[in-house]
């Protein structure tokens, strides 16, 4: 443990920054709890929780000469390394997209248990065997978010659990403990649109719905993106115009709770004004000047952190916020920057400035790592698609980089299949670098039409306009047996794809015209950062933790973790628990012994051994999943008499997947009991289950 605690205030002073913000600071260790909010364990006493999740902000370098995103945000990087632990061995689920990644982080559940394994949109089958698209981003209790039809043919919730009901909401553990929960663009905890969400929350005949029809831009600023889920008897929420916070499927019930939906309801309560100010002191408005939510792309660091600080100062002790990426051109222009381009560097500088002001302001408020749990992460990493920078050796900071070629390689699967393989089977695709294919009629995995289509797609090639090489577009294939292993099969069978392809990460696969009279392969300069795929530069990301009970390890990559682990780690520190068993584990290696629940402190070494094996067995990008994905690809691409090789491979994978699920569920229950229910895990029990997990992993590896 470090001898001297590094606070945000001392960092600010050390970097020569002027202090700003409210002057009503209280001593950090004596700041009172918000009335009724209990976030206390024997080894730690929390007053605040600040959770921040970036969109595609990187810890590691994309160009070895150009400092990484976090290196160009030294105030954030120094804060995390100086006050806690920063891990670069953190991972995403599959597919690695914003929707799935953030929802997995919020719930501690993989996509098969929260419903959005395929995101940021997906398709669902209709009675006629064709499919319609639906959005992953919809309010938590919404149905299938397809605004193109009055009533979608699929009646499942967007956030569908394995039982077909709504997945549990992440704010309920906090509000039931008496803590208001502030949501700043955190996926699906707030209204995401002015169509289906408005109707769901306010009603189709409400004044809010009327505004959404007459002035959609104003309605977005008023009702989308910002919210507060209120504890019962909340003094903060009593000041505003609340609406019922309905969670009809919430385990244990959720009656009598209220919420503030939208900036129109939230801003006057937390700021006493029509608009909240950004960290730069500017009113947050949309492009038309309407006060309130500026749009998701405009939730840059200054805007998101401005809302977080204002909520915390208003007495909302728990805030979860989304911060948009720094590598895209937000605002009047559009497009993407490559590493070290001047606009990218400038945008990262503005992010760093926002964090400098944010931390100074929190210090003045008495909100510090002495009494606050800070968790900061990114939804996923992503893969840069572009040519070599110019000049050679540019570092971006002193010598700006430029790129002659930049942009993902778009590939029209429909045209390429028809022209290269003669395949014209009707289908649709969820466009992505990990495209999900939906064949019309919803044929089975072993249907001859499915098998012929999969083999054909595995052979499709493209001339890469950046490298000049001919690439096989698909790198891995997952049929429904393998998608189940990867946690991609949800409680709604109508949204299960026929199969998923994990493409070369340079490629973004679509389904446009049925020939290549227009080029089927071309650069798309509006986007240059691909994700979703099964690739280490996409699936490996980072997480930082700071606060009471968090060890001061600085940068460490010694513990393999993924997004499911964030929720149980936070709840264990805060003395809370969920009404379900998480897919994650408590990251005890990052926590001081006195902050651990009794069951963990008494069986720490067995817990950590078993938890490490469990992650490699169950995680979507763990060792077991990586091995089965390779084996599935070999089986799917095979072409033997009677399709014998495919059937044999699928049978083996299905059997292994069943064994994996059974063992993983058993381990998860024991880990949960030790963390949250005073259970004790013996060394013999942990060793036996670890051996079983390692044996299953070895069996999966032997398939290749």
Image (tube, rainbow, N blue to C red):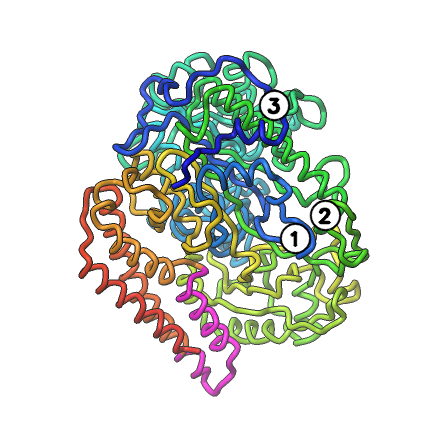
Q: Which residues are magenta?
A: 621-648
Please name the residue shown 54% across and 15% down the image.
22
Upstream in sequence: badge 2 or badge 1 = 2
Quarter of the image where one finds residue 47: top left
**To which residue does mark 1 refer?**
529
Observer-side mark, 2 or 3, equals: 2
Task: Determine crowd level at label 3: few under 14, some 14-19, many 20+ residues with C-alpha closer than 10 A.
Answer: many
Residue 326 position, x and y percent, is 65, 42
The residue lying furthest to the bottom in this view is 641
Query: Does residue 212 show up?
Result: no
Q: Quadrant of residue 77?
A: top right
Q: Residues within 10 Å of mark 2 (few under 14, many from 20)?
A: many
Real-space Cα separation, disc 1 to disc 3, in angstroms: 29 Å
Q: Nearer the viewer, residue 257 or 486?
A: 486
In the rendered view, tell whether residue 335 sits above or below residue 410.
Answer: above
Residue appearing at x 52%, y 56% in the figure: 539
Left/right of residue 68 with respect to residue 27 in the rendered view: right
Nearer to me, 417 or 444: 417
Q: Residue at x 55, y 48 (%)?
A: 120
Number of residue marks:
3
Q: Which residue is mark 3?
A: 292
Q: Left or right: 655 with respect to 525? A: left
Q: Main secondary structure of the magenta part?
A: helix
Q: Which is more N-terminal, label 3 or label 1?
A: 3
Residue 336, disc: 2
Instruction: Determine contact: label 2, label 1, CB under 8 Å.
Output: yes
Image coordinates for residue 297, horizontal then vertical, percent? 64, 37
Q: Is residue 638 magenta?
A: yes
In the rendered view, would you say 429 is above or below 167?
A: below
């Amino acid at each position: 443990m470090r001898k001297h605690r590094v606070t945000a205030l001392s960092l600010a002073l050390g970097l020569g920054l002027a202090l700003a913000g409210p002057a009503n600071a209280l001593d950090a260790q004596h700041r009172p709890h918000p009335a009724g909010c209990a976030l206390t364990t024997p080894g730690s006493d929390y007053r605040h929780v600040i959770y921040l999740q970036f969109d595609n902000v990187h810890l590691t370098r994309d160009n070895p000469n150009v400092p990484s995103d976090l290196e160009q945000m030294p105030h954030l990087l120094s804060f995390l390394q100086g006050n806690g632990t920063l891990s670069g061995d953190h991972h995403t689920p599959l597919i690695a997209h914003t929707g799935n990644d953030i929802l997995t982080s919020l719930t501690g559940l993989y996509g098969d248990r929260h419903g959005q394994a395929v995101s940021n949109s997906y398709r669902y089958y209709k009675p006629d065997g064709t499919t319609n698209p639906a959005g992953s981003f919809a309010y938590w209790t919404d149905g299938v978010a397809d605004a193109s039809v009055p009533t979608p043919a699929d009646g499942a919730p967007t956030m569908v659990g394995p039982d077909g009901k709504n997945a549990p909401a992440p704010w309920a553990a906090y509000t039931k403990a008496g803590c208001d929960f502030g949501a700043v663009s955190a996926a699906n905890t707030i209204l995401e649109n002015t169509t289906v969400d408005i109707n769901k929350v306010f009603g189709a005949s409400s004044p809010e719905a009327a505004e959404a029809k007459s002035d959609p831009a104003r309605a977005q600023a008023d009702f989308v993106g910002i919210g507060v889920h209120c504890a019962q008897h909340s003094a903060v929420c009593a000041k505003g115009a609340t609406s019922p916070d309905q969670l009809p499927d919430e385990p244990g019930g959720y009656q009598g709770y209220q919420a503030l939906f939208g900036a129109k309801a939230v801003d006057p309560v937390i700021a006493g004004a029509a608009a909240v100010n950004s960290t730069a002191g500017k009113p947050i408005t949309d492009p038309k000047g309407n006060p309130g939510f500026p749009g998701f792309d405009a939730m840059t660091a200054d805007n998101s952190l401005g809302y977080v600080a204002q909520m915390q100062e208003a007495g909302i002790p728990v805030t979860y916020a989304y911060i948009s990426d720094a590598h895209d051109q937000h605002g009047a222009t559009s497009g993407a920057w490559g590493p070290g381009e001047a606009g990218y560097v400038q945008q990262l500088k503005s992010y760093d400035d926002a964090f400098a002001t944010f931390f100074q302001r929190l210090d003045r408020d008495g909100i510090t790592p002495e009494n606050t749990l800070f968790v900061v992460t990114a939804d996923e990493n992503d893969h840069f698609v572009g040519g070599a920078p110019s000049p050679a050796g540019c570092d971006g900071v002193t010598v700006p980089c430029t790129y002659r070629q930049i942009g993902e390689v778009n590939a029209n699967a429909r045209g390429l299949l028809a022209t290269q393989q003669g395949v014209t089977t009707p289908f649709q695709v969820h466009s992505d670098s990990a495209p999900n294919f939906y064949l019309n009629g919803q044929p089975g995995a072993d249907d001859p039409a499915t098998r012929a289509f999969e083999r054909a797609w595995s052979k499709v090639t493209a001339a890469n306009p950046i490298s000049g090489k001919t690439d096989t577009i698909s790198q891995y294939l997952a049929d429904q047996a393998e998608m189940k292993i990867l946690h991609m099969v949800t409680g709604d069978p109508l949204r299960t794809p026929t199969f998923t392809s994990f493409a070369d990460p340079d490629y973004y696969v679509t389904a446009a015209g049925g020939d290549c009279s227009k080029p089927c392969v071309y650069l798309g300069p509006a986007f240059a950062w691909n994700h979703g795929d099964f690739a280490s530069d996409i699936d490996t990301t980072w997480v930082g933790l700071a606060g009471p009970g968090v060890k001061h390890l600085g940068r460490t990559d010694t513990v393999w973790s993924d997004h499911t682990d964030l929720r149980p780690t936070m709840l264990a520190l805060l003395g809370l628990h969920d009404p379900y068993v998480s897919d994650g584990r408590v990251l005890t290696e990052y926590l001081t012994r006195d902050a651990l629940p009794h069951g963990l402190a008494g069986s720490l070494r067995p817990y950590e051994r078993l938890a490490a094996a469990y992650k490699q067995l169950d995680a979507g990008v763990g060792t077991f999943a990586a091995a089965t994905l390779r084996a599935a690809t070999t089986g799917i691409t095979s072409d033997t008499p009677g399709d014998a090789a495919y059937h044999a491979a699928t049978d083996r994978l299905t059997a292994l997947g069943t064994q994996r699920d059974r063992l993983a569920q058993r381990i998860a229950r024991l880990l949960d009991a030790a963390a949250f229910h005073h259970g004790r895990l013996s060394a013999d029990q942990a060793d036996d289950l670890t051996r079983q997990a390692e044996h299953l992993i070895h069996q999966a590896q032997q398939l290749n």
